[in-house]
Image (cartoon, grey):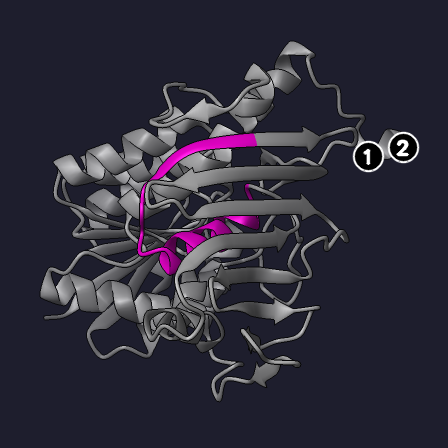
Amino acid sequence: MGYRIAFIGTGPEPDNPVWGESAAMAYRHAPGYRDDDRCEIVSCADLVRENAEAFAQEFDIDTNLIFEDYNEMLRKIEPDIVSVCTPVPTHAPIVLDCIRSGILKAIHCEKPMATTWEDARRMAQEAAKNSIQLTFNHQRRFVSDWREPKERIENGEIGELQRLEVSCGELLDNGTHYIDLANFYNDECSSEWVLGGLDYRTEHIKYGAHNENHGLAVWAYENGVHGLISTGVGEEMIGARNRIIGTDGTIEVHPAGETGYRIRRSGDEDWQMFKSEDEHCDGVKLAIDHVINCLDTGEVPEISARRALAVTEIIFGAWESVRQRSRVDFPLTIDDNPLESMVQSGDINPVPEEEQ
């Protein structure tokens, strides 16, 4: 079966990305479709026509099939799959429009899910209700650096899992990847509660969404395993992107800024370092391949909306814990984004960067 692919949000040309505003992720998604015989890239839409034209030229899209209005593109082109590569606040309205169009088989959206818990929840619910395969680009799951440690856990190399630690720049923008990996390592076990704290003194907006300057959160899974995340640009408290602690050893993924992972089992004096053969592979391309395979087979994708929602609940739950000044139990019962709401209410007053 052949799939017709369209893009919403091409962004600027990738040679000149504006980090924090546009990473031109459409250019990262597109090769995964282009190089798959099951797919044909047929159309694109972007509010800035020049951006769409540059993308169309790069990926051989007919100039008559370029749009500024994505709803018009959906009606006229009737694609099977859409990749949504727009800023975070636009994810929910675009994805919901795509679902309700009744045209698509699948939607692959950039992370994080949304800027409010209500929007994230509604996207997942509407996709399920309408039998649309909705996925979010947590592509690190498919890269050996992160996938091989999961196999070692399953083989019992570090004993019973006890704690999963994460260190990254921000809870929402980066943390969505690494909390997703923590859930992956713990067999997608549901979380019971989260307790969080943060510092947000200097305004830090990435891809249209507020992110804390520094944060710390702990959460508990139903099977007794605990999670811990420390965030802060330039602050590496944990010393690895993911640390996996078991009763008989520890695995660190990307320790001290290095690629690969290392293991120290009980009784070992030193770490044993592993470098994956495909350490420079394209995780986004692997994620696209997975999306297409699941559409072919009907299997639930590893990067499904339901799994992304579990990650997002921990993130917004951590911020809700700050607002409530207490532990937050799941399921999360709010609708908004606690960090943004605290900024809007004046409970938190980050100073714009230009005023520093």
Q: Would you place residue 85 above or below residue 212 in this image?
A: below
Whether residue 212 sits left or right of residue 124 in the image: it is right
Closer to the camera in the image, 246 or 333: 246
Question: What secondary structure is marked by label 2?
Answer: loop
Give the image location of residue 163, x and y in percent. 49, 53
Looking at the image, residue 152 sits to the left or right of residue 204; the answer is left
Q: Which residue is mark 2?
A: 356
Q: Residue at x 49, y 75 (%)?
A: 145
Q: Which residues are magenta?
A: 172-195
- For the N terminus, the image quarter is bottom left
Q: Residue furthest right?
A: 356
The residues bearing labels 1 and 2 have C-alpha atoms spaced at a distance of: 5 Å
* Nearer to us in this view, 285 or 138: 138
Q: Which residue is mark 1?
A: 353
Check the image and report above or below for 86 versus 92.
Answer: below
Amino acid carrying label 2: it is: Gln
| Residue 124 position within the rendered picture, expressed as x and y whole percent measured from the top left | 27, 37
